Structures are given as C-alpha cells and as structure tokens.
Amino acid sequence: MRIVVDAMGGDHAPREPVRGAVRAAREYGCAITLVGMTAQIEAELRKLKTAGLDLHIVHAPDVIGMDEHPAQAVRRKPDSSHAVGLRLVRDGHADAFVTAGHSGAAMAGALFILGRIAHIDRPALVTVMPRLQDRPLILLDVGATTDCKPEYLHQFALMGSIYTEYALGIPNPRIGLLSNGEEDIKGNRLVQETHVLLRESQLNFVGNVEPKDLLVNDVADLAVCDGFVGNLILKMGEATISSATRMAIRELQRGLRLRVLIGIAPVAGLALAARAGRWQVLAGAGIGAAGVAGLLLYPAQRLRQKTDYRAYGGVPLLGVKGVVIIAHGRSDAIAIANAVRRAQETHESNVTGLIEGAMQRIAVSAAN
C-alpha cells in the first residue's frame, strides 16, 4: 500500500509532515510518497534515519495558501501539492492522500480530480469524538457540506454507517439524527424530513438525539447533521475539552500547593511546576511526595491523552472516488503518522467500494 503525504500542508510544513511520514513508514510498514518541493523535503529527510524505508518524492512546485479560495486555487494551481497528490491517487499510483493543508482545497480538489461516487450528491467529513463510554462517537458531516437537503443527510447516514462498521469495527451501528429534542416532531424542516427518510430506510436508525447526550450517554454510535452544525459542534467540543482539562490541572496545582502550605502533604519541601503541559516534581520532596503528586495528577494526564486530537490523526472525506484524509492544520509528526494509519485502515476496509456498492443497489431498487 502506498500513501501520499502532502509535505507542504499545515502550520509546520515541511518539517512535521516529513517526520510524520517517516514515523508512519517505520511503524506501519506502508510505502510513502511525499509530495511537495523536492529540495525542502530532501533537507528534512537528511535529518532523519530513513534506511530501509519505502519513501519516494514527487515534486510539486506550488502550494495552496490558507487565504486562497479553495476551488479557484485548485484550478489555478494544477502543480500544487494538493493537486499532484490527488492525481497520483486518481491514476492508480497511490491508494490514499493525506494532507494537513488547506482543507477546503483538499475537498475541492477531491471533487474535481477524483470525482464523486455515483449517486452520491455531496461528500461528508466524518470525525471520531471521545466520550465517557469506551466506544467513541462518530459524527458527520463536520464541514464538507454546509447547506443540505434531506437526501444528503440520508446519504451521510449510509456512508457513516459503512465507515463505522467496516473501518472502525462497530457492527450495525446505531444512527441518531442530531436535533433539539428526542421527539419525532422536534427539529427544523430539514431534520423533520430527514427523520422520515431515515425511519423508512434499512439503516439502524434510533431516532433524534440531543447534543447534551452525545458525549455523555450511550444513545447512538453515529450522529448525523449538516456540515454547518457539525463543524460548530466539533470546534466547540475541542475548546470545551481543552478548557476542562486545563482547569482540572490548574485546580490540582492549587490543591497541591495548599496542602504543602498547611502541612497536609506527607513530606515537606514539595514544589511543583507545569512545563509544556507536564508536571515535574522539583527540589527536595523525595519519593513520597513524587508519588503523591503522580497519583493526584494521573487522572488529568489520562484525560489529556484520551482527548488529544493527535491520536485520531485526521478525518476521512466520504463520498469521493478515493481515500482522502484531512488532518488538523497544526498537526505535528504524531498526528500525521496517525492520519496515515487512518488512511491505511480506510483503504484496507474498502470503505469506498462498499459505499459504491450500496449506492448502486439503492439506485437499482429505486429504478424497479
């Protein structure tokens, strides 16, 4: 399997995409094609140990900037790393494309170069969100299609169900329709009409679900909404989780300092500092104090790890003829490597082929 990585995409390009690609090639055993400015890519590769890894470079002299109009930029810059990488997938030279660059350009390029799957009206971005239960929540669309019709959301539910079952291993996933109430009559016109379509479908539809239940109660495996609502939920969720984690660590810091001041700590001389998000036990505390600090701080660190966006890598764009993974713009090497892993899993589970087959069967059934 060969994965194309956009070496020029993201806030930390080309350093982090190149490092992430090398990490993925080493850990997951896949072949990597780095697309971008050859001289810059080679300069980064010389800093790394790459012996024995299947790494190739394809030159792309142009880069699509974050301030450029997506569709216009893709048309105006056919030699951009986005366009060159997607053509490699289209022409059969690679199995998937990963980018942390301009997400709008990635979506526009995927539509122009790869094309939509037959009978799919609009693509959707699907993301994985951590929650209280062991199994995560799958949410789509989170930004690909902001203005939707009921038929689009029905297709999103179908594509999301296939991805959830075959790429993530959750059999017969329960599908919920995001609304402002559980009752069938709740929601705007789009939600109400979509509810009817999903209820009459063959999908495992469990009804409307409210945002307050998504990450707390086990009401559904997959939540469906339009891209405008989904993107707001995703960004608000990221901000809330980050804020809650930081507040928890701050309160733990205050609590530990208070215990030291009033003599409750089991040993004297405990001083704590937070550096780069990690707690360090400083001067003269001894093993006992370190143990106390570790026990108290462990839950906060576990929460930070569980909610770290880097662990999920990137979000697949469903509905196009190929595997496209869009990573966060601030992705580091760990996030890029996990995005490559996500691309590998999506390709190996044949999500695109399964969606094509399902849509073909629906079209044939409708014709009869």
Image (spheres, rainbow, N blue to C red):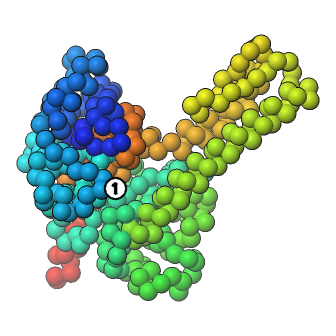
Counting other residues with Cα less than 10 Å from the Cα at mark 1, is it few (<14), some (14-19), or many (20 or more)?
A: many
Q: Residue at x 62, y 35 (%)?
A: 301
- The answer to which image quadrant residue 42 occupies is top left
Residue 367 horizontal/vertical position (percent): 16, 82
> Looking at the image, is 339 positioned above or below residue 113?
above
> Looking at the image, is 334 positioned above or below residue 173?
above
- The answer to which image quadrant residue 348 occupies is top left
Residue 89 horizontal/vertical position (percent): 14, 47
Task: Name the element at disc 1.
Answer: helix
> Looking at the image, is 155 positioned above or below residue 318?
below
Amino acid type shown at disc 1? Tyr
Say whether residue 85 is visible: no
Residue 151 horizontal/vertical position (percent): 31, 78
Say whether residue 103 is visible: yes
Residue 159 horizontal/vertical position (percent): 31, 63
The residue where tag 1 is placed is 163
Quarter that holds the N terminus: top left
From the viewer's perspective, tell me whether residue 273 is left or right of residue 207. Answer: right
